[in-house]
Image (cartoon, rainbow, N blue to C red):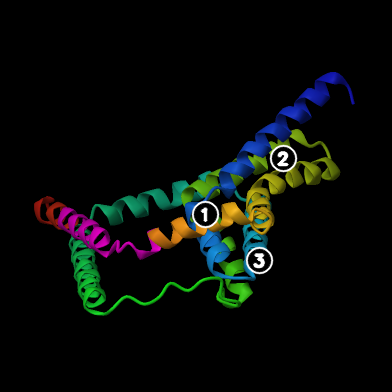
Amino acid sequence: MDEARLLQVGAGAFSLLGLGLTMGFSPTLYGISLHLLTRDRRATSAIRWMVVGLAAGSTVMVVLFQFIDPGNLELLLRHQVAALLLRRGVDLVSGALLIGASIVVALRLHEDRVRPPGPVHHRQSGAGGHRWQYFVIGMSNTVLGVSGIATMYLTGRVVSGTGRDLVERVLLYAVFLVALVGPYLIVAHLWTRLARFAASVTRCYDVVARVDFHWLAAGGLLLAGLLFLSLGLWRPV
């Protein structure tokens, strides 16, 4: 391998590291991982299933984009989605649903205030439920959302553009997978070995878990519902 080719492969691998970290960064999955680590003695197993789902969903998309250009799908759906968003009834129905949801959350807030607070449970064995559920969570986090689709499309372009044969492409994609799932596995591995740090994080998590965010959710839903209703009422027919 000459120097120019080595630089090309190195640049591609570096790009795939960045894409893997970007694709793997999910506040939802990090939140689930933190909850598992502070509540479930078998958290490592659940996190492994979750990252397997994350890798599986990413692989499905990168293979799919070798045959389908997402740009064509965007052009096909853009007109239909735009026409739907411009309909007055959509704004009115969305506003009504959001306001209804805010009322439900407000009622739940009232019930929680009347009901005495229960104890915070620590490190329950088996609290994570069925492990296949975390596979579904990881996979759905990958395939749902525009940013994930765009990231995997770029990943496929970098892999196919840098690798000259199947072996090179598989190795380059392996670099992406390491960056994708590595942070989750490293945190899960170090959690049991850094006892003081884990205990400090658990105490902080317990404090945050006791805070009631229902009022914030109710207010946000109410404001969003009023915004949609105003758009629907003042939008020209």
Mark 3 and mark 2: span between their CA atoms? 25 Å
Please name whichever residue, 46 or 2, is drawn nearer the observer in this view of the structure: 46
189 displayed left or right of 125: right
Residue type beneath disc 2: Val
Distance (Cα) linking label 3 and label 1: 26 Å
Residue lying at the far left in this picture: please name it. Answer: 234
Q: Residue furthest top?
A: 3
Instruction: Give the mark nearer the N terminus: 3 vs 1.
Output: 3
Q: Which residue is mark 2?
A: 159
- Look at label 3 and name its amino acid: Trp
Please tell me whether mark 3 or mark 1 is closer to you in this view: 1
Q: Main secondary structure of the magenta part?
A: helix
Q: Position of residue 149 (x, y in %)?
A: 54, 49
**Sooner in the amino-acid sequence: mark 3 or mark 2:** 3
> Which sits in the foreground, 206 or 103?
206
Sequence order check, earlier mark of 1 and 2: 2
**Marking on residue 49:** 3
Taking the spot 51% from the left edge, 55% from the top edge, the residue there is 201
Q: Secondary structure at mark 2?
A: helix
Residue 91 x %, y %: 21, 58
Q: Nearer the viewer, mark 1 or mark 2?
A: 1
Q: What residue is rendered at 63% in x and 56% in y?
A: 195
Along the horizontal axis of the image, is 70 left or right of 186? left
Magenta range: 208-227
Q: Of 232 and 4, which appears nearest the observer?
A: 4
The C terminus is located in which quarter?
bottom left
State left or right for residue 84 relative to residue 147.
left
Where's residue 15, x and y in %? 66, 33
Q: Secondary structure at mark 1?
A: helix
- Magenta segment includes 61: no
Disc 1 residue type (three-letter) = Ser
